């Protein structure tokens, strides 16, 4: 079993590849849009606000860093919940970064030449050639800025992936065959250690999501680390009341056995 993430540019064939792999392996398939929709439903964030927030350029995030952190952690919590069985194909929204550190994660990058992408954009969106090119270039530029600002990486860097496939050289069927074979490699098998890393990341994400749902704590920008059920919270917040609320909420999250509080009073970000 393995978790497979597929990173792709606009109209680069990622959806078709993800669905083909999921069908071959009998895995659930999840898109970026489905994750955002689930996040809005499960954490009480309006769909319009969530969609806008996750597509806004860096100036927006610089004004509301706490919102950035809260939204990303909520998205991670949803993604972790969907992947808890150790089987998932996810395409979109930096899944390989959100789930980094899990060894049974197969990180795929799919690229296609501009002609392929333009043709797809013209067909699906009813655009003429020039409009399709402009649209693709605009979205690519925004995503590059977004990923670099949020994660400090260039999403096109091949070092972020286990394999990069080019649709100019191979078709979706051939790429699917190779990825299915990758799931059989020992390096991507679920181990006791990788399972524990997954569970730790999942629990810390759930604690974050709990804080994001509560008005008393959704403005905090702190660190949360989970190890075998023990959650450590550290950083600065605005008041002792906020510290108390964080501790109380963390203790209520299923799976938390103990909360280690290393918080101090400093300043909150508000939004």
Image: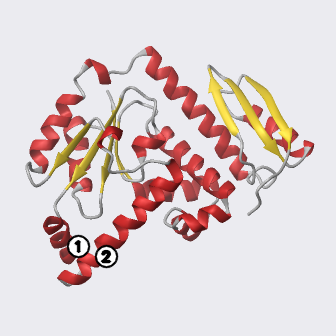
Work out which quarter of the rendered image holds the C terminus and state it: bottom right
The image's colour scheme reads secondary structure
Above or below, comparing residue 77 to residue 56 in the picture: above
Q: Residue furthest top?
A: 192
Quarter residue 257 falls in: top right
Q: Which mark is residue 107?
A: none
- Say if 245 sits above or below 141 in the image: above
Image quadrant in which you'd find residue 48: bottom right
Mark 1 or mark 2, which is nearer to you? 2
At 27% from the left edge and 18% from the top edge, which residue is drawn?
A: 186
Compared to 65, does 22 lie above or below?
Answer: above
Residue 33 lies left or right of residue 187; in this view the side is right
Find residue 28 and report its horizontal and vertical position in percent.
Answer: 34, 42
- The reply to whether dot 1 and dot 2 touch (C-beta < 8 Å) is yes
The answer to which of 103 and 89 lies nearer the viewer is: 103
What residue is shown at x 64% (from left), y 51% (from top)?
A: 70
Residue at 41% in and 55% down: 32
Q: Position of residue 270 (x, y in %)?
A: 77, 60
SS assignment at label 1: helix
Element carrying mark 2: helix
Choose the circle earlier in sequence order: 1 or 2. Answer: 1
Give the residue pinned by disc 2: 135
Is any part of residue 46 visible from this angle?
A: no
Q: How far across and down, in percent of the image, does residue 121 sit?
A: 23, 73
For image coordinates 23% across by 59% down, the residue present is 12
For the N terminus, the image quarter is: top left
Real-space Cα distance between discs 1 and 2?
9 Å
**Residue beneath label 1, please?**
121
| Residue 47 coordinates in the image, percent (x, y) | 55, 66
Outermost right residue: 240
* Residue 131 visible in this rendered orientation of the protein: yes
């Amino acid at each position: 079993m393995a978790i497979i993430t597929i990173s792709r540019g606009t109209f680069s064939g990622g959806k078709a590849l993800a669905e083909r792999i999921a069908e071959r392996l009998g895995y659930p398939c999840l898109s970026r849009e489905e994750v955002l929709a689930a996040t809005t439903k499960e954490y009480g964030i309006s769909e319009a606000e969530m969609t806008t927030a996750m597509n806004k350029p860096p100036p927006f995030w610089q004004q509301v860093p706490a919102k950035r952190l809260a939204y990303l952690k909520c998205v991670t919590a949803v993604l972790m919940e969907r992947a808890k069985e150790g089987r998932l194909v996810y395409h979109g929204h930096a899944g390989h970064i959100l789930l980094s550190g899990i060894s049974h994660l197969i990180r795929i990058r799919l690229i296609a030449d501009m002609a392929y992408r333009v043709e797809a954009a013209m067909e699906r969106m009813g655009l003429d050639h020039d409009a399709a090119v402009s649209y693709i270039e605009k979205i690519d530029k925004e995503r590059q800025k977004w990923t670099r600002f949020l994660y400090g990486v260039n999403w096109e860097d091949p070092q972020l992936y286990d394999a990069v496939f080019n649709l100019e050289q191979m078709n979706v069927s051939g790429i699917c065959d190779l990825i299915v074979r990758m799931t059989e490699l020992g390096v991507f098998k679920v181990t006791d250690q990788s399972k524990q890393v997954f569970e730790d990341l999942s629990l810390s994400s759930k604690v974050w999501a709990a804080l994001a749902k509560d008005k008393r704590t959704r403005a905090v920008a702190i660190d949360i680390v989970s190890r075998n059920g023990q959650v450590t919270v550290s950083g600065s917040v605005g008041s002792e009341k906020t510290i108390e609320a964080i501790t109380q909420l963390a203790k209520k999250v299923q799976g938390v056995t103990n909360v280690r509080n290393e918080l101090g009073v400093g300043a909150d970000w508000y939004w």
